[in-house]
Image (spheres, rainbow, N blue to C red):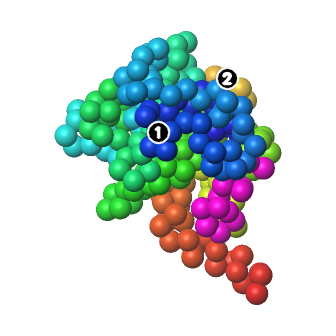
């Protein structure tokens, strides 16, 4: 969390209690997040002071509420003057229906609809990178996050070359994706006479193409690793 600038972690009735001795080594030096962590009996108490709540889960057909992409969520949070919260469920079971019902909107990462499961670490990392990509230049995001995220990625068993390519893809998607997208505003400054929504319409096909490439690379890692593997061997 810390490498994404997120420091307010709120835990709801943690299974192994809190403080948890195993949390320190897993945090890779982000001790300030652990020190500031607060424990609550239920989700309602944890989000009581937040005005907008986003539930990180797959699309729910039994609930009628807006479904946002991470980029749209990041834009809403950046424009909000009041605190917002993102609800993540337990690793094994995810959010319960009553917990999702507390949210104003669902935020979901576009992945294979036939297998929409992400583990907790994957969901947090992807959402944070997409949000950062909407607000910051790609190189800055990489410099800030790589030293902390890399040990986590390795501990989860992912190929580090695959992850590096995916990370840059996700950040680049965020840089052109509405409602923010740093590069969109760069184009607007160069062409002040063109309405910003016209620019958004122009980059939309590139957003769709990038998301399709990202989904393929996540579902079929061999696509990403084929060329690097020929260079290594």
Left or right of residue 3: residue 196 = left
Q: Which residue is disc 1 drawn over?
A: 14
Quadrant the N terminus occupies: top right
Q: Which residue is disc 2 drawn over?
A: 192
Whether residue 123 is situated above or below residue 72 in the rendered picture = below
Give the Cα distance between marks 2 and 1. Answer: 51 Å
Q: Bin the neighbour count of mark 2 within 10 Å (Cα to Cα): few under 14, some 14-19, many 20 and up.
A: few
Residue 109, image x and y in percent?
A: 45, 47
Residue 68, image x and y in percent?
A: 40, 36
Q: Residue at x 67, y 30 (%)?
A: 35
Q: Nearer the viewer, residue 2 or 197?
A: 2
Q: Residue at x 67, y 23 (%)?
A: 192
Q: Is residue 232 visible?
A: yes
Disc 2 is placed on an element classified as loop
Magenta span: predominant SS is: helix
Q: Return the residue found at the far left.
A: 62
Q: How many marks?
A: 2
**If you read the primary sequence from the N terminus, does the residue marked by circle 2 or circle 1 appear first?**
1
Disc 1 is placed on an element classified as loop
Q: Bin the neighbour count of mark 1 within 10 Å (Cα to Cα): few under 14, some 14-19, many 20 and up.
A: some
Whether residue 118 is situated above or below residue 161 in the rendered picture = above
Q: Which span of residues is magenta-colored?
A: 147-160
Is residue 157 found inside the magenta-colored segment of the image? yes
Q: Nearer the viewer, residue 14 or 141?
A: 14
């Amino acid at each position: 969390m810390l490498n994404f600038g997120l420091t307010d972690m709120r835990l709801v009735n943690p299974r192994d209690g809190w403080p948890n001795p195993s949390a320190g080594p897993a945090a890779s030096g982000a001790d300030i997040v652990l020190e500031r962590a607060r424990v609550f009996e239920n989700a309602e108490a944890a989000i009581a002071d937040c005005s907008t709540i986003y539930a990180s889960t797959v699309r729910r057909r039994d609930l009628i509420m807006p479904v946002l992409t991470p980029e749209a969520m990041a834009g809403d949070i950046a424009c909000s003057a009041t605190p917002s919260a993102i609800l993540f469920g337990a690793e094994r079971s995810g959010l319960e229906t009553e917990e999702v019902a507390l949210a104003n909107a669902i935020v979901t990462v576009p992945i294979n609809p036939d297998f929409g499961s992400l583990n907790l670490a994957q969901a947090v990392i992807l959402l944070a990178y997409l949000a950062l990509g909407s607000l910051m230049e790609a190189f800055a995001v990489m410099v800030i996050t790589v030293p902390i995220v890399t040990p986590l990625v390795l501990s989860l068993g992912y190929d580090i070359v695959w992850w590096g390519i995916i990370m840059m893809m996700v950040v680049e998607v965020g840089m052109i994706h509405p409602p923010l997208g740093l590069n969109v505003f760069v184009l607007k400054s160069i062409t002040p006479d063109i309405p910003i929504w016209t620019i958004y319409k122009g980059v939309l096909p590139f957003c769709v193409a990038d998301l399709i490439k990202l989904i393929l690379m996540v579902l079929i890692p061999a696509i990403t690793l084929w060329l690097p593997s020929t260079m290594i061997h």
